[in-house]
Amino acid sequence: MRELTHFSRLAETLMPWRQQIVFVGGWAFRLYQYAPRAYKPDFGAIFTQDADVAYAPRAPLEGDIKAALLGAGFSEEPNFSGDFKPPAMRYTLADADGFYAEFLTPLGGSSGWKRGKNPGERVRDATAINAGVVAQKLPHLEVLLHEPWLVTIPAEDSGLGEPVVGIQVPNPVSFMIQKILIRDDRDPRKRAQDVLYIHDALITFGAMIEDELGPAWKELERTLTSQQQKSVYTGVEALFGDVNDLIREAAGIPAGDRPNMDPAALLAVCQEGFGELFG
């Protein structure tokens, strides 16, 4: 898989910062296959081209990440999809067939707006610069940074002739809970995809819910605000209360070698999984 080689090249380039960064989004799910206790389903993960790299607002990112990426053959391109100043940046490889990396950091307690240079002016608080890279600020991203897991891409898969070690990814509970928290802010075209990711995460780690994921949820819940806690429970009910249009759309997402899914079966996995997770 060429895209796995591209990702391995990115992860290897960012190795000096591996303790401060967490790979989130679709690539996190693809990397779950390397978790020791993960169930290996007979279908592949949802394909994604972008690799999202997250870090905490006060992460001690010493050195120059941008220089490291440029030195490894990546090119920097502005992402003008938002009216952000400065714009968030993408890092691409010339031969990477659409693969690119972006940096993200939590929005935190910000309202999403900040003072401008002129009196009374308010501008979007949407990006931050750290270690030479411009990252986009996103709400609830801090959930993905809570107690991350470590995975290793083995040498036979990395395409580099050696393993890529010490890659941090969100623990599966954080992965699922953050998707529930962002449901109302999410692009409508991606909400069904997020539902399918949640279903697949429950399939992959279902055997671990009682002894590992359940306790992990209790720890994560204590770090959430009361508003976030309420949003999680109401979100699970809204998304997985019955077979709705979103469930049907998720079941119909084409995903390579995945067989056609029954919406009711997808819903049952999610209802049972969250019922056990929440205890």
Image (cartoon, grey):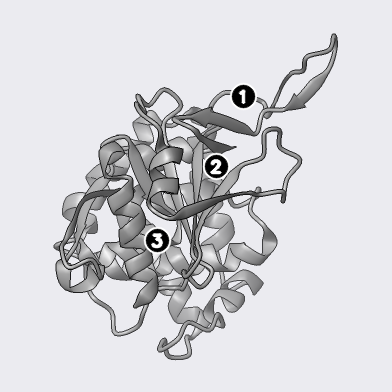
Q: Is 124 left or right of 102, judged from the image as shown?
A: right
Q: Earlier in the sequence, mark 1 or mark 2?
A: 1
Q: Quadrant of the N terminus?
A: bottom left
- Residue 15 vs 142, above or below: the answer is below
Nearer to us: label 1 or label 3: 3
Q: Nearer the viewer, residue 275 or 71?
A: 71
Q: Which residue is mark 3?
A: 27
Residue under label 2, please give it. 231
Vertical comparison of 32 with 182: above or below: below
Name which residue type carries label 2.
Ser
Identify which residue is drawn at 67% across, 57% down: 187
Circle 2 — which element?
helix
Q: Which mark is residue 110?
A: 1
Earlier in the chain: of badge 1 and badge 3, it is 3
Mark 1 and mark 2: span between their CA atoms? 18 Å
- Asked whether the residues under the numbered discs 2 and 3 touch, taking CB atoms below 8 Å apart as contact, a structural biologist would say no
Determine the residue positioned at 61% across, 24% down. Answer: 110
Of residues 269 and 23, the one nearer the viewer is 23
State the CA–CA distance, disc 2 to disc 3: 25 Å
172 displayed left or right of 134:
left
Q: Is residue 208 visible?
A: yes
Query: For the residues marked 1 and 3, what is the alpha-carbon distance in whole angstroms?
Result: 27 Å
Residue 133 placement (x, y as % from top left): 50, 36
Nearer the observer, 176 or 167: 167
Give the amino acid at mark 3.
Trp
Residue drawn at (30%, 37%), measured in percent from left and top? 17
**Lower sequence index among marks 2 and 3:** 3
Element type at marker 1? loop
**Residue 130 on image: x %, y %:** 48, 29
At label 1, counting other C-alpha atoms closer than 10 Å, the crowd grade (few under 14, some 14-19, many 20 or more) is few
